[in-house]
Image: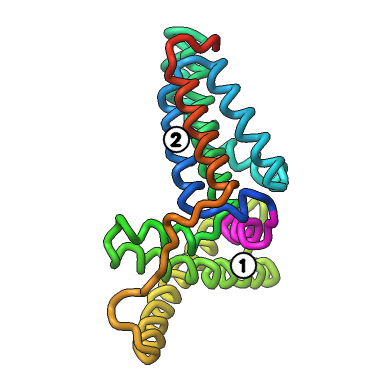
Amino acid sequence: MHLAEMDLLANTGQSFLHKSGVTSKLIFTILMLSAIISANKPGILIFLIAVLLVMFVLAKVPLLKVLHLALYPAFFSLLFALIKFQDSVFAGLTVILKAVGAALTMILLISTTPYVDIFACLSVVLPRILVDIFFFTYRAVFILLEKAENLFKSIKLRGGYSPLALLYNFRNVSQMIGALIIHSFEMGDRMHKIFSLRGFNGYIHVEVEWFQFNSNDIIIVGLGIFILIGTVMPWNPW
């Protein structure tokens, strides 16, 4: 639902994170997720979340646009947290904080790194066909989102949506989704023909600049290593 908004932030930002290489940001993401997974105390997780929030501020990513996205994993982790609350309050809080921290880590990555760059970097370790699917899906999602928005506006203008008529709304929205599915198949076939005419031979060639690290990249990777070591060390005060 927020794909276009995240894509705009990633492609128009001018902060040091936006100017850093995709490789260093992926390494930082892996290190940060490892630290969050390894942490077993709420104090450590609160500190890690605070570090992420500071990085959002430094990256000039509006917190109001990203914080509410972390509420989704917090809500869905409540079921596991309720089970852990039977053991202790801290155990339940740890589950929720881990979900929020992991979500914020991924949001930081996608809000400062264009999806195309991420897919290009992943093409080194993932099968080509899977990376091609990512590329094609990335473009198609925006088209389908615009199509869905236009269809929903048409339904509302024709009186097909009412806040109080749930069954009526469900029927009309289901028909809209069915129309979008049919449109997606037609669009996929048309895109394949277009790419074939333009020389598509089974995979999309992408170039990845792995080792062009600048000072920003070194700082980001160093910060990730420092955070992970500080989290797993037995003497940390948190």
Which residue sits furthest bottom? Answer: 197
User: Chief secondary structure of the magenta span?
Assistant: helix
Q: Are marks 2 and 1 in contact (CB under 8 Å)?
A: no
Q: Which residue has dot 1 on it?
A: 149
Q: How many C-alpha atoms fall within 10 Å of the one at disc 2: few (<14), some, or many (≥20)?
A: many
Out of 18 and 107, give the one closest to the viewer.
18
Tell me the magenta residue range.
Answer: 1-14
Q: In screen coordinates, is 170 left or right of 37?
A: right
The answer to whether one can see residue 75 in this image is: no
Q: How many marks?
A: 2
Decide: is 191 above or below 49.
below
Which quadrant of the view contains residue 148?
Answer: bottom right
Which residue type does callout 2 highlight?
Leu
Out of 1 and 161, give the one closest to the viewer.
1
Decide: is 114 above or below 231.
below
Residue positioned 63% across, 72% down in the render: 150
Out of 161 and 232, give the one closest to the viewer.
232
Residue positioned 42% across, 63% down in the render: 208
Which residue type does callout 1 highlight?
Glu
Decide: is 141 above or below 33.
below
Q: Which residue has dot 2 on it?
A: 31
Q: How many C-alpha atoms fall within 10 Å of the one at disc 1: few (<14), some, or many (≥20)?
A: few
Estimate the x, y position of residue 182 in percent, counting from the top left: 41, 74
Estimate the x, y position of residue 110 in percent, counting from the top left: 54, 51
Out of 136 and 38, give the one closest to the viewer.
38
- Number of the front mark, 2 or 1: 2
Separation of marks 2 and 1 at Cα, in angstroms: 38 Å
The answer to whether one can see residue 219 in this image is: yes
Locate the C terminus and report the quarter of the image it occupies.
top right
* Figure coloring: rainbow
Helix, strand or loop under label 2: helix
Query: Is 63 covered by the magenta stretch?
Result: no
